[in-house]
Image (spheres, rainbow, N blue to C red):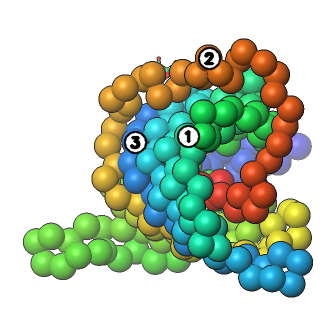
Amino acid sequence: MLRIVLAVVLVVTIKGEGCCPYDAWEGFEGLLTGTVQGGQSHLTQGAFTLHLNNTKRMVASEVDLVVDGVVIRLKSIQDYNTGTEYDIMDGKCTKKPIGQWKPQCIPDDAKVVQNTYIGAGSEKVAVKTYLYTDNGLQVYATVTASGCIPVMAAISGTTAQGVPTVSVVEFSGITSGIKDPSVFSIPAICNSLDIPHQHIPIFKGLRRSFFH
Ligand SMILES: *[C@@H]1O[C@H](CO)[C@@H](O)[C@H](O)[C@H]1NC(C)=O
């Protein structure tokens, strides 16, 4: 009996294949997303300058979006300690609730589908492509074999809201650490009044970060 229990414990504690990049990092994320909502197809192009601190459980980003040809520019601060996202746009701040914090990692149950490299010759960089599901979406994520630095991802499926979606995400210019910690400071306009929740149409549910 004891042996069986131990065997079960051992199986459970075997470490998965997953990996995490730096605890705190900054970088650029380019995004192209296609969705179908209400029988209409929509295209979103996004450019994000990301700042993440896993220990702090905060993500700040400067966002440029083109949604069906309409330009949206905002700054977003996600504070998972209070479960609040602040979107600052045109000098106004809106708040909305966000889900649970998830470490910005490749999950342990992800499958390695390819070990290869990008570049060529002496410039080549070893990468790994993982396959996993996240909130019902299929994610192919490529990260550097050493350091787990995100390179690109292809995400497809139907969201929890029933929206069919396909995204391609690429990363560049990633650095360790946070150059200016004030990126995580909630601007005073966000605290002055409890502004009623008003979500930005279409934007909601479209934005996918690499690991989410
Ligand atoms: C991340 O946040 C933690 C907790 O607030 C802090 O101690 C640490 O210095 C931060 N890291 C960086 C690189 O700013």
Callout 3 amino acid: Glu
Image height of 15 relative to 42, above or below: above
Left or right side of 52 for 132: right
Secondary structure of residue under mark 1? strand
Q: Give the spatial CA distance, label 1 vs label 2.
A: 14 Å
Q: Is mark 1 within 8 Å of ligand 1?
A: no
- The residue shown at (49%, 44%) is 62
Q: Name the front one of labels 3 and 2.
A: 2
Which residue is label 2 attached to? 188
Q: Is mark 3 within 8 Å of ligand 1?
A: no
Which residue is label 1 attached to? 75
In which quadrant will I find the N terminus? top right
Image height of 56 relative to 171, above or below: above
Return the x and y of residue 157 as percentages of the image width and height. Answer: 75, 76
Return the x and y of residue 162 as percentages of the image width and height. Answer: 88, 70
Q: Give the spatial CA distance, label 3 vs label 1.
A: 15 Å
Mark closest to the chain's N terminus, 1 or 2? 1
Q: Which mark is residue 26?
A: 3
Left or right side of 48 for 189: right
